[in-house]
Amino acid sequence: MHRKTCKRYNVPGHAHALTFTCKDKRPLLDSEPAKRLFVASLGAARQSRRFHLWAYVVMPEHAHVLLWPREPDYSISETLRAIKRPMAFRAHQQGIVQEPGFWLAGGGYDRNLTSPEAVHHEIEYMHGNPVRRGLCAEPADWRYSSAGFWAGHADVPLAMDRTVPAIDA
């Protein structure tokens, strides 16, 4: 079996658009408990790995995250592990998955963003994902997304960081 690899660039000042997929592309994130676990894992990783969280979307079989590391010396691979491992462990503990593994093996998708325009475009793309899939009518209607936060909704699963530092090119 060939394992997909992903070259990661840990460049101070760059934002990262991350996408990771569930094992066998199954809808393991479709249940309410799984979505809550993902959001909790993302929130905990934000504290431990010290990044600003600008956007996220949880889809049934994958998730998108847009973050900006606050420290100049960081590892985006370690940040991904800090999000994915606790989620997988708790999903197994709680019986959301029976067999080992939650995430598709491989590097996933990681793209460095170096301009405000690229960041805004990525957020629009991420927030539009549930609409394009027919899961909701408007981006802010999808509960497990940062679109509701940015639309001003008070009752959101996870607040975003409003401070947006300058993106270095």
Image (spheres, rainbow, N blue to C red):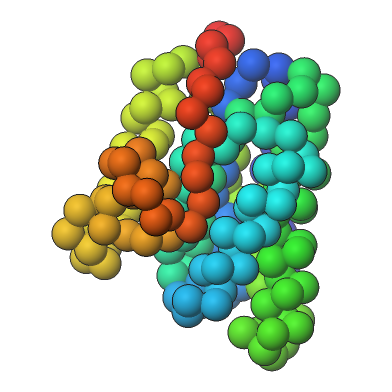
Q: Is residue 1 above or below residue 9?
A: below
136 sits left or right of 56 in the view: left
Q: Is residue 110 visible?
A: yes
Q: Quadrant of the C terminus?
A: top right
Q: Quadrant of the N terminus?
A: bottom right
- Position of residue 61 measured from the top left corner of the image (x, y, whole percent): 48, 68
Q: Is residue 4 visible?
A: no
Please tell me which residue is depicted at 74% across the width and 34% down the height of the picture: 50
Please tell me which residue is depicted at 17% across the width and 59% down the height of the picture: 137
Please tell me which residue is depicted at 42% across the width and 17% down the height of the picture: 116
Please tell me which residue is depicted at 62% across the width and 84% down the height of the picture: 96
- Position of residue 142 measured from the top left corner of the image (x, y, whole percent): 32, 59
Q: Is residue 93 above or below residue 19?
A: below
Q: How many marks?
A: 0
Q: Is residue 122 above or below residue 65?
A: above
Q: Is residue 33 above or below residue 149?
A: below
Query: 27 or 36, which is in the foreground?
Result: 36
- Position of residue 2 measured from the top left corner of the image (x, y, whole percent): 70, 62
Q: Quadrant of residue 119?
A: top left
- Which residue is at the far left? 137
- Position of residue 149 measured from the top left corner of the image (x, y, whole percent): 38, 44
Q: Quadrant of residue 125?
A: top left
